[in-house]
Image (tube, helix red, strand yellow):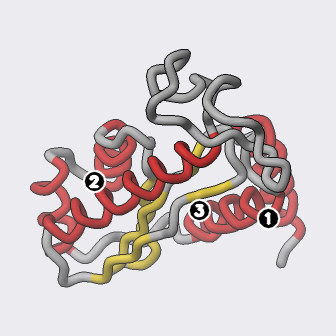
Amino acid sequence: MGIKWQLQLLHKLQLLHKLHKGLTSRQKFARVHQTMENDMKNDMKPNEDMAKMLDETFGRKGLEGWKKSVYKGTDCGAWLELTDPNTIEMGSIVEGADECSDSHTLTFPFEGKQIWDALDAIEKECDRIWNETHGCEDCFPVDEETGYTPVNPNCKSCSGDGIVI
């Protein structure tokens, strides 16, 4: 690992620390390392057929357009990365909890339905994590082991929505 790459990694770690306070150090490092690897692959272009299919699926062109569609098109603010010319990876961070959804990797050939199925699974997992960690003070007592309060769907104070962060 060269010194320039190490300095870039340190800078990105510092920025990520400020932006993602809810992540554990291990999650922050993994996310930055993945970003750095992707930055080193800047010249990487997606498979042409996969790019056409993703353009049609997301209604936007190019990697930045696909990322925007995934982020804005999900309640959990999911992310998408191109990990090699034939592969995309998607997942999400649950804000305010030290947890992330599982990552979903698709290697071309795949269809748009598989993307939406993966994003639905990510949304469901994020909802589950949210409901386990974001209850209001009236939902339930704080779980001593985790330090989180689960959401009570019948809570009269928050109407079963939990706290807003």
**What x and y, as percent, mark residue 153?**
45, 35
Query: Could you tell me which secondary element the residue under label 2 belongs to?
Result: helix
Q: Residues within 10 Å of mark 2 (few under 14, many from 20)?
A: some
Which residue is under mark 1? 26
- Number of on-image labels: 3
What is the quadrant of residue 84 in the picture?
bottom left
Query: Could you tell me which secondary element the residue under label 3 belongs to?
Result: helix
- Disc on the earlier residue, 2 or 1: 1
Along the line of sight, the residue nearer the viewer: 14 or 70: 70
**What x and y, as percent, mark residue 60?**
20, 45
Residue drawn at x 30%, y 51% as measured from the top left? 66
Quadrant position of the C terminus in the picture: top right
Residue drawn at x 42%, y 69% as measured from the top left? 89
Residue drawn at x 34%, y 42% as measured from the top left? 74
Which of label 1 and label 3 is nearer to you? 1
Mark 1 to mark 3 CA distance (whole Å): 20 Å
The label on residue 62 is 2
- Disc on the earlier residue, 2 or 3: 3
Along the line of sight, the residue nearer the viewer: 141 or 165: 141
